[in-house]
Image (cartoon, rainbow, N blue to C red):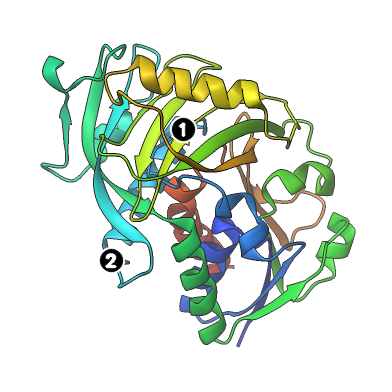
Amino acid sequence: MRSITVIGCGIIGLTTAIKLQEKGFKVTIIAKEHFNKTLSSKVGAIWFPFEIYPKEKTNHWATLAYQEYQHDIKPKNGVSFIPFITAYNDNSNIDWTLKMPEGTTKKASKEELPKGIQKAFISRVPLAEPLLYLPYLFQRFIESDGTFLQHEVSSLEEASKLDGFIINCTGLGAKKLCNDKDLQPMRGQILRCKKMNIPSCADSTKKGALSYVINRSEDCVVGGTDYLDDWNLNIEKNDTDLIIKRLLQTSLSQKQPEIIEEIVGLRPKRSEVRFEFDSQYPAIFHNYGHGGAGFTVAWGCAIELTEIIDAR
């Protein structure tokens, strides 16, 4: 059995490891943190191609992931398909709508548009609730004879000495690991609230003014922020107030949300996803820089990556 090592235990690392197992690889995950401490555990995790490039690859990966989620709805694993309103303008990537299954996407009528949104699609998309889905994926990995080791890999030289091929799925951690000047944090602050009887939607048409609502099985995620090159992990009251203000300015909600928890995470933003073998260490394959769309494309990246590795 061929051995392979995945560095990173977020949604990118876990999906990559599982797809490699399905191809017959013996997989070890090495990670600085357990899955419940990663960025992936903090996010809304709706299928939504947000701040990820290049567009053509993103749409392909997102399509593959959509299909994977269709076959991955299990009791209590956190995967469901929900209606989602996605605002767009002339600068938005809307090519993904052309690849959606027939009957799952339509343009919103004026009556269906939230206040302040001029144009939007209404789509039926996957939602993967991290607090349910990540433990399910990790258990799936372990039950397929996977090994998990908690350790911070400090350099590519160290990584190159690990067993078999090495897949770098370290997200923002790749900035230090790879000295990647193109990789930067995009700070997101969100509110986890009690469920609200309002539609799930997202408006990313205004840079620096991201706004969204994601209704989940037990709670509701209200966001957010999209501040570039911001390493601040502290909860900021001004951002909480701003998120609530944007929510109330729409026709979605007429009352203050009941906040359960305030959360901050740093998305791994890059000019484009790094998806390639390393030029200096040929056994290392990089798979990071997925911006705000990790759950949207993770399975698609894992499928393509596994085909590349399996062909070697």
Q: Position of residue 27 (x, y in %)?
A: 62, 77
Q: To which residue does mark 1 refer? A: 50
The disc, 1 or 2, on the residue closer to the chain's N-terminal end is 1
The residue labelled by disc 2 is 71
Q: Residue at x 75, y 32 (%)?
A: 232
Decide: few, some or many residues near mark 1? Use Cα within 10 Å; few <14, some 14-19, many ≥20: some
Residue 309 sits above or below residue 177 on the image: below
> Judging from the image, what secondary structure is the residue with disc 1 in?
loop
List x then y, in percent, for residue 47.
37, 44
Tag 1: residue type? Phe
Q: Quadrant of residue 4?
A: bottom right
Q: In front here: 94 or 120?
A: 120
Whether residue 287 sits left or right of residue 177 in the image: it is: left
Choose between 188 and 186: the one closer to the eye.
188
Residue 44: image location, x then y, percent: 46, 45
Q: Does residue 226 show up? A: no
Helix, strand or loop for disc 2: loop
Q: Is residue 143 above or below residue 293?
A: below
Query: Which image quadrant: the N terminus?
Result: bottom right
Q: Position of residue 279 (x, y in %)?
A: 77, 48
Q: In the picture provided, is 137 more to the left or to the right than 116?
A: right
* Mark 2 residue crowding within 10 angstroms, few (<14) / some (14–19) / many (20+): few
Relative to 300, say whether 74 is above or below: below
Asked if residue 172 shows in the view, the reply is: yes
Which corner quadrant holds the C terminus? Answer: bottom right
* Amino acid type at mark 2: His
In the image, what residue occupies the spot 64% across and 39% down? 264
